[in-house]
């Protein structure tokens, strides 16, 4: 059983849900947690998701089946809580950390945890795959020690920034 530690708002924004429309943040958090519950059940994983703050409409430190939801205490950010969880983990090699925050990723790498960027996890989470690691280990392992781009990745990004989208492409 894998244990996932997830940067909640980082993942939520990676899904694109907050940009998609008028749903209140509480509803978006709830939708994400339900999706994480399905992911946990399908892959027999344990999931802890950490959100910033103790805002309005938040039921603090609530649990779904196989998903524990934590909110950072007053005057602390979720990033600090996540880094603390990584440091106190008995065997961080069994931990999968989901975030795109550089400080969190640095702490996870330093302690030997597996990392999955929020954008990659979001794609697989909403694609219904049981494990986001199924398609990613080679890519994530490469980036653990070598943050440079491959020639193919470099060409891709050069094309993205050199060729503005066509108005016809946007209409499709």
Image (cartoon, rainbow, N blue to C red):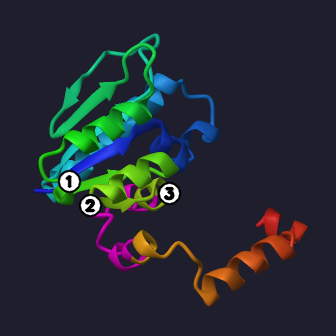
Magenta segment boundaries in residue numbering: 123-141
Q: Residues within 10 Å of mark 1 (few under 14, many from 20)?
A: many
Secondary structure at numbered mark 3: helix
The reply to whether residue 101 is in sight is no
Secondary structure at numbered mark 1: helix
Q: Residues within 10 Å of mark 2 (few under 14, many from 20)?
A: some
In the shown orientation, is residue 108 left or right of residue 171? left
Residue at figure coordinates x 37%, y 23% from the top left: 72
Residue 143's disc is none
Q: Earlier in the sequence, mark 3 or mark 1?
A: 1
Is residue 138 rendered magenta in the image? Answer: yes
The reply to whether residue 54 is in sight is yes
- Residue assigned mark 2: 112
Instruction: Give the spatial CA distance, label 1 vs label 2.
Output: 6 Å
In the shown orientation, is residue 147 left or right of residue 131? right
- Residue assigned mark 1: 92
Instruction: Give the spatial CA distance, label 3 vs label 1.
Output: 22 Å
- Residue assigned mark 3: 119
């Amino acid at each position: 059983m894998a244990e996932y530690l997830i940067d909640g708002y980082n993942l939520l924004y990676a899904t694109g849900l907050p940009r998609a429309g008028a749903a209140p943040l509480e509803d978006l958090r709830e939708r994400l947690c339900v999706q994480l519950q399905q992911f946990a059940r399908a892959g027999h994983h344990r999931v802890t998701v950490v959100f910033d703050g103790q805002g309005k409409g938040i039921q603090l430190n609530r649990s779904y089946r196989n998903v524990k939801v934590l909110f950072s205490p007053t005057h602390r950010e979720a990033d600090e809580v996540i880094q603390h969880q990584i440091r106190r983990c008995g065997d961080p090699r069994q931990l999968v950390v989901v975030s795109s925050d550089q400080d969190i990723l640095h702490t996870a790498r330093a302690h030997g945890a597996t990392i999955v960027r929020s954008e990659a996890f979001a794609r697989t989470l909403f694609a219904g795959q049981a494990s986001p690691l199924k398609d990613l280990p080679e890519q994530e392992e490469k980036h653990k020690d070598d943050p440079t781009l491959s020639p193919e990745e470099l060409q891709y990004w050069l094309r993205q920034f050199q060729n503005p989208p066509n108005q016809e492409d946007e209409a499709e």
